[in-house]
Every structure is written in structure tokens, then in C-alpha cells.
Image: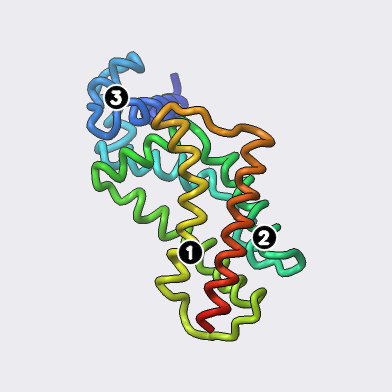
Amino acid sequence: MRAPERERLILESAIRFFAENGFEGQTRELAKRIGITHSAIYRHFPSKEALIERVYEHVYLGGWQKHWAAMIRDRSSPLESRLTRFYCEYADQIFRFEWVRIFIFSGLKSFDINRRYLAMVMGTIGEPAMIEARHEFGVTSDSPITGRERELFWGLHGRIFYIAIRKFVYGAEVPEGADRRTAIADGVRQFVAGARQILTASS
């Protein structure tokens, strides 16, 4: 097997391995699963931390779509439509066994995957969405997004992500396909209605 192919095999196997075992899983056990020597892993990844970093880049950054930022700022359609479209596409990307479970394990082990990823979500989607909410609701303010506004956004984001947690962590039945899209649309509609009431009342 050529070096690039072996590196890809190690990475793909590591993604599944960490999703099943968490980051406490040992690279020696990963090597046994793949059928290679332990040292072979370290010829491609100098440390376990380097392997975990590649997992982050592949699973989390690799699935992030560049057009999402522009979608949120596109005022040719109502904010509710933009957020619904975004979260339907986002759910298609993240509602995966490996994505959800690695994210949960990372938080439990205090790796910074969660911190970095959530900062990207807030900077790319959350704060722009709240700026767009101000504009659509007629709230005139040039002040930075407040902690209260961030919590409004996290309430929406967490509601949708919790569907994935119920499926891949709890093993519970969740809406799929068109039913999931309806659940997302319902969540966004409630968010917009609630945010409108709160932001206009406090302006």
C-alpha cells in the first residue's frame, strides 16, 4: 500500500475508532484493528494529538460549507427561510455517528475541538444571524452582539443538535427525512418569533 493510501486508511479507521471508544482509545488498539504495526501509525502522524487534529480537520472542517456564511446574510429572502435552509443542510452534514460521538467525547475529555468548532459556528452563523434579526425586526443598534442574543442563537442551535444526540448517543427514535426538515422548520419559526418579541421589547 502506498503511503498516501495508508495514511487515509489510518485516518478513516481512527475516525470510527474514536467515535466508538472515545479519545481514551489507545493507538496500539487502533493499529491492531487496521492490521498494521503500532509504529506505522507514527510514521504518518507524529503523535496521538496530531492524529486527533487531522480527525478534526477531516470530520468538522471538511464538512463545513463555504456558502453558508453568504446564505445567512442574503437579504433577498426572510431570515426564517435562510435559517431553515441552513439548518436542513447542516443537519445533512452532521447527523452522522462519527461526527456526533467524537464531538461529545471531545467535550468530556476537554480537548479543544468543541471550543474551536463552536467559536466558528458563532462567528460564521450565530452573530451574523442575530445582526440579520436586528435588521429584519427593525432594531437599530450598532452595538456588538450581546450575551443575551448569543444565548438566543444557542437555544436554536442546541435544539437542532439535540435531535442528533438523541439518535447517536441515546439510541432514541428521532424524526428522519421530511419529518426532520419539518422539525427544523418548526424550531426556526419558534426562534424567529421569540427573538422578535425579545429584541423589539428591549430596543
Tell me which amino acid carries mark 2.
Glu
| Secondary structure of residue under mark 1 | helix
> Residue placed at 47% from the left, 75% from the top?
145
Q: Secondary structure at mark 2?
A: helix
Residue 59: image location, x then y, percent: 46, 40
Q: On the rendered image, what quadrant is the N terminus found in?
A: top left
- Inspect the image, locate mark 1, and give the three-letter code of the amino acid beneath it: Leu
Per the model, the C-alpha gap separating discs 2 and 3 is: 50 Å
Query: Residue at 67% of width from left, 60% of height from top?
Result: 80
Dot 3, how many residues are within 10 Å of its Cα: few (below 14), some (14-19), or many (20+)?
A: few
Find the distance from the CA under tag 2 to the CA under tag 1: 14 Å
Say whether disc 1 or disc 3 marks the residue closer to the N-terminus. Answer: 3
Q: Secondary structure at mark 3?
A: helix
Residue 203 pos. (x, y %): 53, 84
Callout 2–callout 1 Cβ contact below 8 Å: no
Q: Is residue 83 visible?
A: yes
Q: Earlier in the sequence, mark 2 or mark 3?
A: 3
- Nearest the eye: 176 or 39: 176
According to the picture, the residue beneath numbered tag 1 turns out to be 152
Query: Which mark is on residue 40?
Result: 3
Which residue lies at the image location 43% right of the left edge and 26% below the top edge? Answer: 171
Q: Amino acid at mark 3?
A: Ala
